[in-house]
Amino acid sequence: MRVFIDIGHPAHVHYFKNLIFKFQREEIPFLVTARNKEVAHKLLQAYGIPFASRGTGNDGLLKKLFYTVGADLQLLKLAREFKPDVFLSFASPYAAHVAKIMGKKHIAFDDTENATLAHRLYRPFTDVIYSPSSYSGKYHKRQVFFKGFMELCYLHPKVFTPDPSALKLLGLKKGAPFVILRFVSWNANHDIGHEGLSLQHKIKVVEELSHFARVFITSESTLPANLEPYRISIPPEKMHDILAFASLLYGESATMASECAMLGVPSIYHDNVGRGYTTQLENEYGLVFNFDESSTGEKKGLQKAIQLMKNYDRSLFLKNRNKILQNTINVNALMEASIVTPKNS
C-alpha cells in the first residue's frame, strides 16, 4: 500500500502524525504534501516527517482559484511519480482532484460544517467522508459518521502524555494558574464574513483574567503594542504540553477549544456560526462554552470565564473529559482502517 497525504493546516499534522509514525515504523511508503500555513511545516520538521511544500496559499476568492489550479498540477506531478494506491486528507480539494484524475480513492475526514466552498471543491471527487457524530451540517451521501473527535487522534491518553517541563518555557511551575488566549487570522474560506473579537474586548479579557492567573496570548495576527508582551513564542510541538496544564482557554479557535476539552481544560469559544463538535462539548460535557462575536456575546463570554476562574474545579473538568474517553472510539484505528477498507467500498 502506498499512501498520499495532503496537509493544509497545522491541525492536520496532528490528525495524521500517529498514522504516519506507524507507516515509518512498518516501512509503508507514503508521501506528504503540505501547505506552508502558520506552523505546519515546522511541526512536520519537528516530528521528522518528510514532506513536499505546496506553497503558502492565497487570500481572496480569485487568488484561491489560481492557487487551486497550481496546487492541483503540482500534486498531480508528484503523485504520478509516487504512484499512490490511496489519497488521504482532511477535506483537501487538491488531493480529491488528483485522486479522481488518477482513478484512485480519496478518503477524507471533515468536521467543519461551514466550509461550504471546500465542500463544493472536494466532495464530488471523494469516495468516503468520515465525520464526527456531532456534525450538524448538510448530509452527503458518501458521509460516514463516527463517535469521536478529530483531536483524539493525538490527545487521547494512549498516544499523548503531557510533559510538565514545557511549563519552564513560560516561566511557570506545575500547578500555577494560567490562561491562554487564542486569536485567529480569519482568512480561511469558512471565515468569510467573520470579524472576530474586538480589540477593545481582547484588552478587557487580559485585564480581567489577570486578576486570577497569568495570561498568555497566541495569535495568528498582529497584536497592539500593549498586548504584545503577553504573546508567547514556543516551539509549536510543545503547545499541547502547555495547554494540558492551563486553567482556561479563551479565544476564537474551535480546534484549540476541542483540544483543551480532550485534555480536561475548559474553554470559552467565540464564533458566529460555531461547530457541531463545540456544541456537543458544551451540551454533553460542559468543557466548551460557545458565544458569538457580538458585543453581547463578548460580554457573556467574559462573564462565563470569570465565573469559571472564581469557582475553579479541575476535578470536575477531568471527570467530564473521562466521559468523552468512555463514549468515543479509537479514531486512529478508524483512520488506518479507512485507507484499507473504505466504509462504502
Image (cartoon, rainbow, N blue to C red):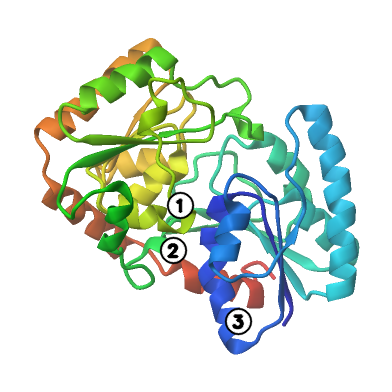
Quote the CA–CA distance across marks 2 and 3. 17 Å
- What residue is pinned by disc 1? 133
Q: Residue at x 60, y 81 (%)?
A: 24
Q: Secondary structure at mark 1?
A: loop
Q: For this view, does 96 lie left or right of residue 258?
A: right
- What residue is pinned by disc 2? 154
Q: Earlier in the sequence, mark 2 or mark 3?
A: 3
Kindly identify the amino acid type of the residue bearing the numbered disc 2.
Answer: Tyr
Q: Tell me if residue 341 can be seen.
A: no
Q: Residue at x 59, y 39 (%)?
A: 138
Q: Residue at x 70, y 41 (%)?
A: 118
Tell me if label 1 and label 2 are in contact, CB under 8 Å: no
Answer above or below: position of 264 versus 275.
below
Pick the residue in front: 139 or 211.
211
Mark 1 or mark 2: which is in front? 2
Circle 1 packing at 10 Å, graded few (<14), some (14-19), many (20+), is some
Quote the CA–CA distance across marks 1 and 3. 30 Å
Q: Position of residue 268 (x, y in %)?
A: 32, 33
Quote the CA–CA distance across marks 1 and 2. 19 Å
